[in-house]
Image (cartoon, rainbow, N blue to C red):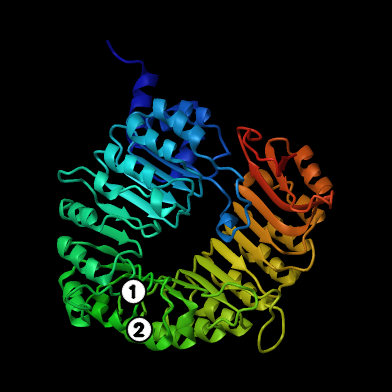
Amino acid sequence: RWAPPDQVLENVLESVLEFLTAARDRNAASLVCRSWYRAEAQTRRELFIGNCYAVSPRRAVERFGGVRAVVLKGKPRFADFSLVPHGWGANVSPWVAALGPAYPRLERICLKRMTVSDDELALIPKSFPLFKELSLVCCDGFTTRGLAVIAEGCRHLRVLDLTEDYFHEEESEVVDWISKFPECSTSLESLVFDCVSVPFNFEALEALVARSPALRRLRVNDHVSIEQLRRLMARAPHLTHLGTGSFRSEPGPGGALSVSELATSFAASRSLVCLSGFLDANAAYLPAIYQVCANLTSLNFSFAGLTDEEFIPVIRHCVNLRTLWVLDTVGDEGLRAVAETCSNLRELRVFPLDATEDSEGSVSDIGLQAISEGCRKLESILYFCQRMTNAAVIAMSENCPDLLVFRLCIMGRHRPDRITGAPMDEGFGAIVMNCKRLTRLSVSGLLTDKAFAYIGGHGKLIKTLSVAFAGNSDMSLQHVFEGCTRLQKLEVRDSPFGDKGLLSGLNYFYNMRFFWMNSCRLTVKGCGDVAQQMPNLVVEVMKENEGEMDTVDKLYLYRSLAGPREDAPSFVNIL
């Protein structure tokens, strides 16, 4: 018996869609017609939810039946700066409850900025017998008890990555989770727990590494000394990614480890391409890594407060770096050395040792301009500083036209060009005019409406825009809404924008994933007008000072197919 023609076409379409992996391409395919919608849903293997409140778990699992991997994001990004109140939400419990019965063959879960309890972690091995990968990024709520359940219950585990999670546990309550992994050979390929700040059983880790022949990524916490690090490296000579732990000696009966002994261990690790950690680094041991520097494509010193004298000898050996994260303690001289050495650099992040507004800061426009002149293949930069000039930013736009991400964070409020005293309008204007492929932009410093007119006029590909301490009227927001037609995420803090600026976005909010405003000039009435005119938009307002009845301290506005959430705490008012 022959299948109907429509069924044949649908089978062929499903076979073709199996090769379509990009989420954007799949979303576009699902909009062609109903048969494409059904075929795309049946063949989708990875489910990405950029806002856990944008759709209900029930609706998601009903549409997509064959999912093997789930990526789920919770709190807004400003939670990283402690601007989202504690207890705001983003609990993973309703999602875990829905995923279990729907996806028994689920293999991978990645959660970002979500609250995850130990009991919810315990549901993973019970619900998903083939589970292989768990990644928790900037999450909270769990302890070593939950990690122990994952280690013991997920027999096929390949990846356990804990990245920048918020971990609070009394030492007396710590569970020996490392020893819960299977005693036979494991399938582990990646084990990352540098954010787990409590002590652990090192002997169990050493044994685990020894019986994990596929292990390629290992990042340990600050309870690992260089003596212990050397033992781990001997057990895993084929590591490609290594997080060093403290990078400090804890001498035993035989005395402290020498630099040459540690250098021998690094020399034997010929596969290393990514080095991080240095959580409490003793700079005297840095020469030990010279042996691998030439092979490194990624180096993360963002926890090591190195001076330029300590940093420069290392970076001179890193001729093939593509990604570099450092603290601003390396100074402009350190950045000049990067520019002279790392011509293939694609990503640079310079974090502040002291992130307060009145800090001195050790890097400036001098370092930025040096980077632009030496690292002309740069595609992404995050740069925290206190002093900047338009000339340096313009030079960056001219020398690095391939920039996709430009995030300049001038920490002091309303800081002008440090030489001319002029607003920073022309610098940011040059970035959006000369960097044609720019998709993410963060602006700060003394900026007027003119800067936002530049952004709206030329930032046609910008998807994410972050604004801090900038602008001088509501026209700034109007320029952005009208000009940045691909804008998905807009974050604004401590800027003089009010209801008029908010209402200028009415025609654009449905096309955005979210809009966050913090410490601006909004009123409850203005936010209520948005909620009234856009019923399919969720408008959450938060007030810190109950005495000021009409003011809004925080606004979180997002599109949702599920309507207002049911777990909002008392300090969140959904209009």
Nearest the viewer among 568 and 110 is 568
- Quadrant showing the C terminus: top right
User: In the depicted view, which residue is nearer to us: 54 or 166?
Assistant: 166
Q: Which residue is mark 2?
A: 341
Give, as a three-letter code, the residue at label 1: Leu
Provide the secondary structure element on which disc 1 rests.
loop
Asked whether 459 or 522 is in front, the reply is 522
Can see residue 313? yes
Local crowd size for mark 2, using a 10 Å CA cut-off: few (<14), some (14–19), many (≥20): many
The residue that disc 1 covers is 321
Residue 126 drawn at (x, y percent): 34, 30
Q: Position of residue 209 (x, y in %)?
A: 20, 55
Residue 358 position (above or below residue 514): below
Q: Position of residue 550 (x, y in %)?
A: 84, 49
Rendered view: 359 above or below 7: below
- Give whichever of 11, 286 is nearer the camera: 286
The answer to whether marks 1 and 2 mark residues whose Cβ atoms lie closer than 8 Å is: yes
The amino acid on which the numbered mark 2 sits, given as a three-letter code, is: Thr
> Residue 176 at what x, y percent from top left?
30, 48
